[in-house]
Image (tube, helix red, strand yellow):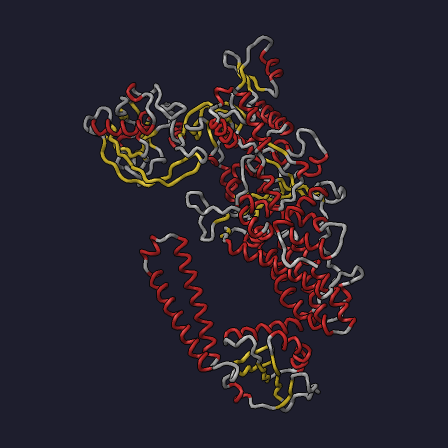
Amino acid sequence: MLDKTYNPGEAEARLYRAWEEAGVFARGRKPGAEPFTIVMPPPNVTGNLHMGHALDNTLQDVLVRYYRLKGRDVLWQPGTDHAGIATQMVVERNLASQGLNRRAMGREAFVNNVWEWKAQSGGAITRQLRRLGASCDWSRERFTMDEGLSRAVLKVFVQLYREGLIYRDKRLVNWDPKLLTAISDLEVESREVKGHLWKFRYPIEGEEGRHITVATTRPETMLGDTGVAVHPEDERYRDLIGRHVILPIVGRRIPIVADDHADPEQGTGAVKITPAHDFNDFEVGKRHNLPQINIFDEHAHLNDEVPERYRGLDRFDARKAIVAEMESLGLLEGIDDHVHMQPFGDRSGVVIEPWLTDQWYVDAATLAKPAIEAVKDGRTRFVPATWEKTYFNWMENIQPWCISRQLWWGHQIPAWYDPQGNVYVAECQEDAQAQAGEGVELRRDEDVLDTWFSSGLWPFSTLGWPETTEVLERHYPNDVLVTGFDIIFFWVARMMMMGLKFMGDVPFRTVYIHALVRDEHGQKMSKSKGNVIDPLQFIDTYGADALRFTMAAMEAQGRDIKLSEKRVEGYRNFGTKLWNAARLTQMYDCAYDTSFDPAGVTSTLNRWIVGEIVKTEERITRAIEAFRYNDAADAIYHFTWGTYCDWYLEFIKPVLTDGAAAEQAETRATAAWALDQILIMLHPFMPFITEELWGKLRQREAMLVVADWPDYSGLPRDDAAFAEIDWLVRLITGIRAVRAEMNVPVAAKIKLKITDYSDSDLARLRNSFDILKRMVRIEKAYFNNFPGKAALKVEEDSGISYDYFEAQEVRKGAIQLIQGEMVILIPLEGVIDIAAEKERLQKEIGKTDKEITTLDKRLSNQGFVAKAPEAVVAEARARLEEYRQTRQKLEDALVRLG
């Protein structure tokens, strides 16, 4: 017998260990089967499981487990990313706690230290993914810096360089002055800050006393100005276009240029141009051939390009000094409070500086063209399709990709320099030396590659490329990529470009873009807000199945997930419901019969449940294959909880206790078979509890994880059985609603007085009257006998009488239900105190009206709506709607009482 309760904490670790030891996640178990392939977006080796990972990997695992059950040869390729900056920061902090630093250690010793850390502490997230139930082929786990992937990186870099698609150039980058490296746009966090807008007067050359006023949020960069831009149609400045101003403090003569970048509606309409320290200014500068003057060093301190008194100052100290000097010169026109977006390094937390520096770049525009065409011609599709527009927008406006990082941890760039600065790119130093000539001293480039460079090769480098392997030929292209929208450009685009370039085909056929996981109020999770939810805590408390099912059930295409602990708790209760149902079948000896044929069942209840299973499987299959996770989860949830547990098991109890032997045997076998079908269909969503029940309900050699998805092609849908049971379900639901709304005591028995019925209604009620007596506590049913109705013999002890009654009299103090052609009157006189119930309902309506009035007033107050947090306003609106619905129900109940 099953334990009284299911213990996920004990079962999950045991079951996952058994799966791994049995090797059931490995590809190649069905060599002749059609392959199904997904590559895991490689989490950072420094990372811990967060809600984004939990969602992303749950959705992948639902697909993987589903297609494994469907008989496909599944490969879910796992691995981790070396995460250059993140990992280097972790190790440097560890060293600092020991009084060490990487520069004193030297590069080789430091990198060895990182490898030691990775071996001991890295990869915690892969252990956490196991706790989630991720059924990856761990035997094939890869790391972006392992030997095979590193060889792929070298080959790609060298080939792209030789084709002119990788080059070295001086351009603006996002520079982190704390970490002393360029970082990608993805590693830049834009924050809204309260700052100032300073207005400076720049004197017009040759026209004493006349100035042009520019507005800036960064006074310190004015020392690098090489132009002033105005809109070509701005009448205020038209006569100044082509003339020059004298840059205050510096004394440099700089031109006034006409450019659409200047917005007449913003600030003063005149914009200072600093090409070396602003991305927009860089483009303006290129259009007008303005000089690029870099005034910062790597620490964001002012360098030798500025007047001597400013050299060596921190950028923010320089800001104060410049504003003070401009004021002393009489050139500070004003200072306005100004809220604007400012870039911060997501790891260092410091303000990012656009900085002009020599870096390595990929000609992304050239590589993007085939990637754009591949989506346009349908070789790769996005789900939801609306993300294709975002993809095209990014790809069609793509900029050169900066791939060099000033770090020590990562793939070191395979480029060597001779004393004259000539560069030699090769896969190894020996090849570079051969290019340079014997005896030429070479120095290797110290930079490493952007992490996205190696992860852009992930769909094929993990399969053995550059070698031509059986795995590569069988599993490339991948079937699906599941990922978040925030890395469509940074990762999806890179994989598309690299896959088409080096494999000649797209890396995946479908890209499924999921939404964000937010808190229960719809707010984005962040440490600063204190609303970050730890998935491991939910797994500890409710089990992995509950969290997984929550994620899937709430994953509706194009809609963010508002996650609350109550939802996770609710789906834990769903698991409990399933467990209790399994215990019930054991109590009634519902044993699986290997000779059982669901197509041969004869009783209405059994024909009905077989048909409902067929329909449920069709809904789940259609939904999963269309990436409608919430629809699939909804189908199995409602079938399991409602159809099977609440209805079928309740309906068959009298059969299992008092039915004929043949009917009992068929029903026991049907109940056991139906439970098996639930376990199979639910397995992709809740793998642990379904596997546990699969093994414990009957001894089986094969695990559920490698069972076969059901094929119901030979099972008919029995419309007559469905109509019969649907009629009964609707009747019970209606009577239960009346009892609840009218506050009928649970133990009280009620009578039904039925008029305007058909012969089939009478027959159905007679067939199901024992069920009705038990499930809605009916004492007796009276059918109104009037001319034209056929006389049916009714057993005296059946609880049904067939006699005339005056319907109009019965309607007084009775509730009326309509079921098909049948009109059912439920007299409540003597069952409840009708006067007291009316009084109670009126009081409840009064209380509800007060709440509605209060909330109406609050939401009508524009000040409240404008100033209150969005979550508070949304909650108030939701409560108002709930109160309105409650009031309507109370009003309906009062009307029913007359």
Residue 765 left/right relative to 489? right
Residue at 59% of width from left, 82% of height from top?
A: 752
Q: How many marks?
A: 0
Q: Position of residue 635 (x, y in %)?
A: 61, 59
Indicate whether 534 appears above or below 883.
above
Quarter residue 570 falls in: bottom right
Indicate whether 193 appears above or below 228.
below
Q: Residue furthest right?
A: 595
Residue 505 left/right relative to 879? right
Indicate whether 432 appears above or below 802.
above
Q: Is residue 256 visible?
A: no
Residue at 66% of width from left, 46% of height from top?
A: 14
Q: Position of residue 82 (x, y in %)?
A: 56, 32
Residue at 61% of width from left, 34% of height from top?
A: 458
* Quadrant the N terminus occupies: bottom right
Who is closer to the viewer here, 636 or 425? 636
Residue 647 left/right relative to 567? right
Q: Residue furthest left?
A: 209
Who is closer to the viewer here, 462 or 499? 462
Q: Is residue 325 visible?
A: yes
Indicate whether 299 appears above or below 704.
above
Q: Position of residue 811 (x, y in %)?
A: 52, 85
Quarter residue 299 falls in: top left
Q: Position of residue 2 (x, y in %)?
A: 68, 58
Residue 591 left/right relative to 825? right
Residue at 34% of width from left, 27% of height from top?
A: 315
